[in-house]
Amino acid sequence: MQKTIFYHDTDCGGVVYYGNYLKFFEEARTLYMQERGYSVPDLMKQGLFFVVARQEVEYKYPVRYGDIIDIDTKIAEVSDIKIVFENTIKNQSGKLCTKGKTTLVCVNAQGMPTPMGVNVKTAMAPNNP
């Protein structure tokens, strides 16, 4: 996924505000799932909700206003109730700027862990391109 950094993404110094990387990761995860045939609203209609259980971020190099970044998303692990996403963000020069790892847990409408189902699990499998 490619993204242009706008002024509203940055702090007063023109560097991306650290919390906005979580938004970038979420946008990339959403598109990743859509590319595999699963939209978040459709999953919610099926009673499947994915909540963030753990988030890791490693800031390596600043991203600034006007930069164009590439956000790479892949699956590191999938179980019956969990998906672990890994993201890397590189600037237009190809320099690694940020790494992230997000663990999502599938829950039902009451917030209790629930299996995502074999179809979703298979679509999100790490070896599924």
Image (spheres, rainbow, N blue to C red):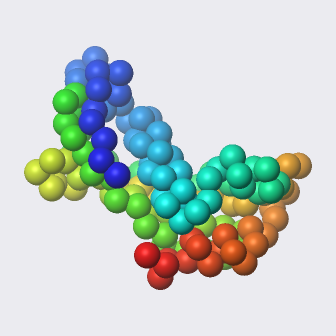
Q: Residue at x 23, y 21 (%)?
A: 13
Q: Residue at x 53, y 51 (%)?
A: 30
Q: Residue furthest top?
A: 12
Q: Is residue 6 visible?
A: yes
Query: Residue 99 falls in which quadrant of the image?
Result: bottom left
Picture coordinates of residue 124, whole percent (x, y): 57, 71
Q: Residue at x 75, y 50 (%)?
A: 44
Judge from the rendering whether residue 96 lies leftward or rightward of residue 27; answer left or right.
left
Q: Is residue 26 above or below residue 35?
A: above
Residue located 60% across and 67% down the image:
83
Q: Position of residue 78 (x, y in %)?
A: 60, 74
Quadrant (top left, top right, bottom left, bottom right) of the C terminus? bottom left
Query: Residue 11's spot in the image, x, y percent?
Result: 31, 22
Q: Nearer the viewer, residue 25 or 58?
A: 25
Looking at the image, the residue that sits furthest to the left is: 93
Quarter residue 96 falls in = bottom left
